[in-house]
Image (cartoon, grey):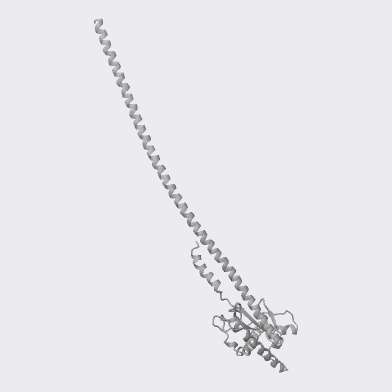
Amino acid sequence: MSATETTEDGGEGYFASVSDLMVGILFVFLLMLTVFALNFRDAEDEQKVARKQYEELLLRAAAAEKKAQEEAERAEMQRQKNEHLRGLLKQAVERMTQDIEDRQQARQRLLSRLEDMLKKAGVIVTVDPETGVLRLPEQILFERGQSTLGTGTNNARLTDARAVLDKLSESLASVLPCYSSRDLRAGCQERDLATLEGVLVEGHSDVQGYRGLSPEDSRDRNDRLSVERSLNVFKEIRQKNGLDDLKNTSGFPLLAVSAYGDRRPIVAGSTEEEFQKNRRIDLRFLLSTKTSKELQRLIDEIKPALEDVQ
């Protein structure tokens, strides 16, 4: 082989090697480019996913903020309703308290007026403004075991008892219409209207037992005795001076009867004088339970307000 041939063969081999190298490099480059493109695509997809998630988070945050705002508005509305209701309830309590005080004061005026009228008529009575009781004088006290007015050896007691009850009836007929009606009459004050629900004629006995009777039977006997005493006084006054026609604001008779036997003594003791004081008749003036116009207005406002409370 000549030198020229060898050189030519070596040149061709060299160029072939360079060509193969270039092809290999190009292949590697293309492969890297492909990998880069794929990685770029994956990164782009991940970015799209991340963006979508971010947008969803923004939407959820906006929805949560809107819901929180709506709840805050509802809470504020409810707070205002509760505050309004609280104010109404406070006013109602104040009005109710004022109504009770007004009626108690009216009853005190009634008792004082009756006491003064009877005193001028020569009848001395005892009044208890706190409980609304007018206690009849000793002329109406009863003998032991008796329920009839004026029982005793001296018939003058019956005359005295009836005279006291006549004066009592006249005084009651003069005063009670101002406190039992809703209509203003001559000589009455508007602040005293509708004060009374009723006037109870209460009968009482002492605690003494009866010979030959057990304690239980003695108490039953005293219960009946106190009923008879209150009924007898009630019959003496109810048909005089129009008292039987007096009605409360509900249209029911103002006068009624009650009895307590020996359960409500006014003095404790075992002397005849103390027993006699417990054998008595009281008049108890019951306050009306009717609500005032102002209180009724507040109640009418409170009812729908309560329905809004959660």
View extreme (top): residue: 2
Of 31 and 269, which appears nearest the observer?
31
Res 151 seen here: no
Of 291 and 206, which appears nearest the observer?
291
- Taking the spot 54% from the left edge, 74% from the top edge, the residue there is 293
Relative to 39, 101 lies left or right: right
Q: Quadrant for residue 259, please give it.
A: bottom right
Q: Position of residue 94 (x, y in %)?
A: 59, 68
Q: Quadrant for residue 290, please give it.
A: bottom right
Q: Position of residue 266 (x, y in %)?
A: 70, 80
- Taking the spot 56% from the left edge, 68% from the top edge, the residue there is 92
Q: Quadrant for residue 216, please give it.
A: bottom right
Q: Position of residue 188 (x, y in %)?
A: 61, 81
Up/down of 98 relative to 82, above or below: below
Res 66 seen here: yes
- Taking the spot 61% from the left edge, 73% from the top edge, the residue there is 100
- Image quadrant occupied by the N terminus: top left
Of 222 and 258, which appears nearest the observer?
258
Q: Position of residue 278 (x, y in %)?
A: 70, 83
Up/down of 299 relative to 250, above or below: above
Relative to 126, 33 lies left or right: left
